[in-house]
């Protein structure tokens, strides 16, 4: 039997593509491993990321490592797919010719044909999950119609394309039948969902349809855009118990100067109003955001305004990253990247120190409270779980010390928080609940 190693780099949207490919390969009788520590397959497939400089460097480094394995005879075939090769296919083919074939983000089905196999349309919605079996990522669209100044995603993925509601619902039903209880709904831009297919924003209706499916315990939403937010989603989140009170909404900045230069099509006042609406309409909601530091034109005054914003809003979850120039974007063609890397790094460190303090205070305020938790794994002497306010991989976790009572991975339990750290909570099982 031929064995294949698949290595996924980048975001959870890439992970979904890898999982679909794994299912197709397994249907053809291949033995497939995902992100192995010691790859041993006859064939390797690298699913690359091309979003920002660091991600591109990582992808190229991994390709080169596997190219060496091929040169030494430890690997028969090497294939590359994903965002990096979508954007730089011709250049990569010249620079790293050891790769047998490069595919883009959307034509990876051709890999099966090049292996002498067929794509199985009858299992198109099926995936072999690489996550724990109780949760899965659910991709509802591809591409993005936004034209933010700094972002290369529309260049790589093209225009926004929504998946039909019925197709998504069928996939959820299939995944529930495989034991999935929790769904991380993902897209490059969630709030645009449906405009191309149905001529209106259909995210609230889609989430209601998913929520109605028996066996769906938690639905969590990722990567929303603040402009023209579909306000009916507030009602859905408030009324549906299995829709987590959690929203991942990338705001990037707060000063009107920077929002304009970033081409975000939203103002400071509108941003504050949206946050206020979230907290009024969905009591208890936890907001996650991402901020960009050091975009061309960011003055000290802009940065001070951003710090004040973080202190005032007190995001439950927050990440930040430094601007890096991406060729082909509006910023690369019209702005000079005049802020030096040291200044960017200093600002990044400063904003994250502020958030670190806020996170510690918010965590400490949960001591004594009770939460429903799903158990992800056992690690050392602890069961490790999450509340509805915590997404896998990126958010805080709940650590429950192992006792005589055995807990099952993928099951829900009620816990009382007994202590907190900067990022994680510590809890005890509440007996009889």
Image (spheres, helix red, strand yellow):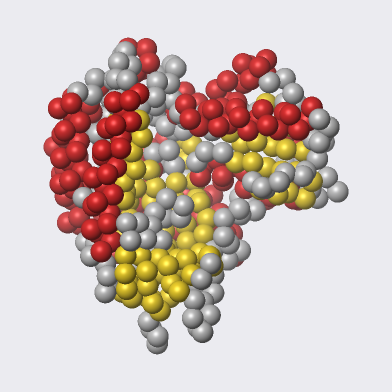
Query: Residue 350: horizontal and vertical position, in percent?
Result: 26, 38
Q: Nearer the viewer, residue 72 or 214?
A: 72
- Please report the residue visible at 43 percent of the width from the left and 72 percent of the height from the top: 400
Residue furthest out toward the right: 1
Q: Nearer the viewer, residue 354 or 116?
A: 354
Query: Residue 55: horizontal and vertical position, in percent?
Result: 50, 32
- Please report the residue visible at 37 percent of the width from the left and 81 percent of the height from the top: 430
Q: Report which quarter residue 323 is drawn in.
A: top left
* Whether residue 403 is visible: yes
Compared across the picture, whether 421 is left or right of 273 comes to right
Query: Residue 148: horizontal and vertical position, in percent?
Result: 34, 26
Q: Is residue 136 above or below residue 355?
A: below
Q: Quadrant of the C terminus?
A: bottom left
Compared across the picture, whether 363 is left or right of 77 comes to left
- Please report the residue visible at 55 percent of the width from the left and 32 percent of the height from the top: 58
* Whether residue 115 is visible: no
- Please report the residue visible at 32 percent of the width from the left and 13 percent of the height from the top: 336
Q: Nearer the viewer, residue 153 or 318?
A: 318
């Amino acid at each position: 039997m031929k064995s294949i190693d698949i290595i996924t780099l980048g975001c959870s949207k890439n992970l979904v593509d890898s999982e679909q490919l794994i299912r197709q390969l397994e249907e053809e009788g291949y033995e497939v491993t995902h992100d192995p520590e010691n790859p041993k397959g006859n064939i390797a497939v690298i699913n690359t990321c091309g979003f920002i400089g660091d991600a591109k460097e990582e992808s190229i480094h991994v390709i080169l490592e596997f190219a060496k394995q091929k040169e030494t005879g430890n690997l028969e075939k090497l294939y590359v797919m994903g965002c990096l090769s979508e954007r730089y296919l011709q250049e990569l083919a010249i620079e790293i010719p050891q790769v047998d074939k490069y595919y883009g983000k959307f034509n990876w089905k051709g890999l099966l044909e090049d292996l002498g196999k067929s794509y199985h349309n009858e299992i198109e919605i099926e995936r072999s999950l690489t996550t724990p079996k109780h949760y899965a990522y659910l991709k509802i669209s591809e591409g993005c119609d936004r034209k933010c100044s700094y972002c290369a995603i529309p260049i790589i993925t093209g225009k926004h394309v929504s998946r039909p509601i019925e197709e998504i619902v069928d996939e959820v039903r299939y995944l529930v039948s495989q034991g999935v209880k929790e769904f991380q709904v993902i897209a490059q831009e969630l709030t645009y969902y449906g405009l191309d297919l149905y001529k209106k924003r259909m995210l609230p209706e889609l989430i209601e349809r998913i929520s109605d499916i028996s066996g769906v315990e938690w639905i969590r939403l990722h990567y929303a855009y603040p402009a023209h937010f579909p306000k009916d989603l507030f009602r859905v989140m408030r009324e549906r118990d299995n829709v987590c009170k959690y929203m991942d909404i990338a705001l990037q900045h707060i000063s009107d100067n920077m929002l304009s230069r970033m081409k975000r099509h939203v103002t400071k006042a509108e941003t504050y109003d949206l946050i206020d609406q979230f907290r009024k309409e969905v009591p208890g909601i936890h907001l996650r955001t991402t901020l960009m530091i050091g975009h061309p034109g960011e003055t000290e005054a802009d940065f001070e305004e951003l710090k004040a914003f973080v202190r005032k809003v007190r995001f439950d979850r927050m990440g930040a990253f430094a601007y890096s120039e991406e060729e082909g974007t509006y910023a690369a063609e019209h702005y000079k990247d005049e802020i030096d890397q040291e200044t960017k790094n200093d600002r990044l460190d400063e904003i994250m120190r502020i958030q670190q303090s806020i996170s510690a205070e918010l965590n400490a305020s949960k001591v004594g409270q009770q939460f429903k938790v799903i158990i992800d794994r056992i690690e050392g002497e602890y069961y490790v779980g999450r509340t509805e306010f915590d997404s896998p991989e990126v958010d805080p976790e709940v650590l429950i010390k192992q006792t005589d009572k055995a807990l099952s991975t993928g099951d829900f339990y009620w816990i009382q928080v007994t202590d907190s750290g900067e990022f994680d909570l510590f809890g005890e099982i509440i007996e009889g609940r």
